Amino acid sequence: MSKPLAIALMAMPALFVAQRASMGGADISVSDVALAAAFGTAVLLGHRPYSRELRALLWFNFGYQFATLITVIVNPYLQNTVEWFHAWLLISGALVVGWAIGRAGYAKWAFTAMLVAGCLLAAGTVIWGVMQYARGDFGPVYPEIPWPMHKNFVGTALAFVALIAYVHPPWAGLSTRWTRPALWLLVIAIVMSQSRQAWIGLVIAAIVITARRGGQSKLLILLAVPAVWLTVSMVLEQLESQNRHNSMFQRLQWFREVYAYWKHEPIFGHGLRFWYVDPTLPYQPPQAELEVVASAGLFGLVAFAIMWVGFIVVLWRVDKAYGTLALAAVLSRIVQAQFDLFWAGVQTSVPFVIAGICLGALALRDSTVASLSSDIGRVSPVRPRGLSRPLPYDRAVDRPVGGG
């Protein structure tokens, strides 16, 4: 691998930092800066050509970007244009970054960096949670270590890392001696965060992984029982409280407001990041399809649905050894986004980086196999004296049959 491509590899831990970076007055996150730097090096120094699977994913994302370009034209304001490029970076940019790393043979180091970053966040969550429990507060944990984080951010981000530890694909060379304890630490932190969307996304991903492996999973039961219990009990508690300010009733109110707002611009929407400029609805809709339809209208929503169906179909058809983790990470993200924000830097980019790494590693394997086959094919068969034709060639033993 070219040394400058190490910039993309070193960006892996920074992908989990959602804190804002001050750059010329622009409101961007450290994760966005890291992804942009990694994308630049991946484009300039990554291997070509891209694999068929990666090209398919990039084309599906291009279709969505083309559809949302219309809302950028119809609603001309700066945040709309900036977010159009940002959204493209979060999916296509992340795929290219992951693919370049995986194709260069550095999947192990990328996944290791992600696991270390995830365990650091998980340890901070557990420590902060223990301190909170000691005060008699058993509510959701909003960790302040190593920096302040929302419970839904830390829960969903750690869920992706937990998938890496759970699958630990053999081709990545990860040792189960430390991925297993890392998985337990991550799961405990997710439980303490009480992020319902993280749990649901993780359970769905675990079901897919188990189905593709054709076996049973103790972890699936471990995840499903607390996930169902936490989700049902918390929803029932909020409904019974009749507190109009809790998360359940608040979300229902937001859904009604977004629906009423969308009806004013049903076809092409109000523009990406409309809540930055329109005081009518000054918040990001907390559900993927609602955000897309309010931002890009029905035109954008159809393209969004086609994009996601395309993603799932393509990744489902990939060799299971490489495609299972990619499919689980991407599917987990769209499931999470049914209950919370979708276009959020870290939560959107990380699963696509993981998918890109898997596809890049698959391309590396295919390239290696093709190269070995080509080398064997170039070996010339031996023609003993007195024979007008070469002897049949047996590649299994690398010599002509009967040639001594």
Image: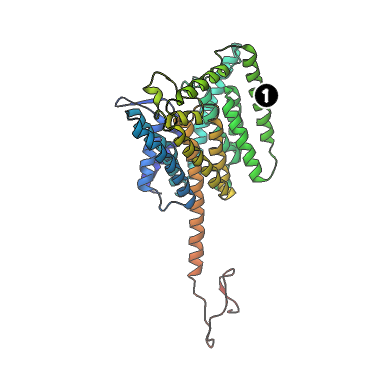
Q: Secondary structure at mark 1?
A: helix
Left or right: residue 146 compared with residue 247: left
What residue do we see at 54% from left, 29% from top? 156
Residue 301 against residue 324 in the figure, above or below = above
User: Foreground residue, 178 or 4?
Assistant: 4
In this picture the colour scheme is: rainbow
Q: Mark 1 belongs to which amino acid?
A: Trp
Q: Residue at x 47, y 70 (%)?
A: 378
Q: In this rendering, does residue 97 appear at all?
A: no
Relative to 225, is 55 on the left or the right? left
Q: Examine the rendering and report whether any part of residue 117 can be seen.
A: yes
Q: Position of residue 74 (x, y in %)?
A: 35, 32
Q: Residue 24 at what x, y percent from top left?
A: 29, 27
Q: Which residue is mark 1?
A: 229
Residue at position x 51%, y 54% in the image: 365
Q: Quadrant of the C terminus?
A: bottom right
Front residue of 61/206: it is: 61
Residue 398 vertical position relative to residue 16 in the rendered view, above or below: below
State which quadrant residue 224 falls in.
Answer: top right
In this picture, residue 237 sits left or right of residue 289: right
Residue situated in front as seen by the camera: 361 or 227: 227
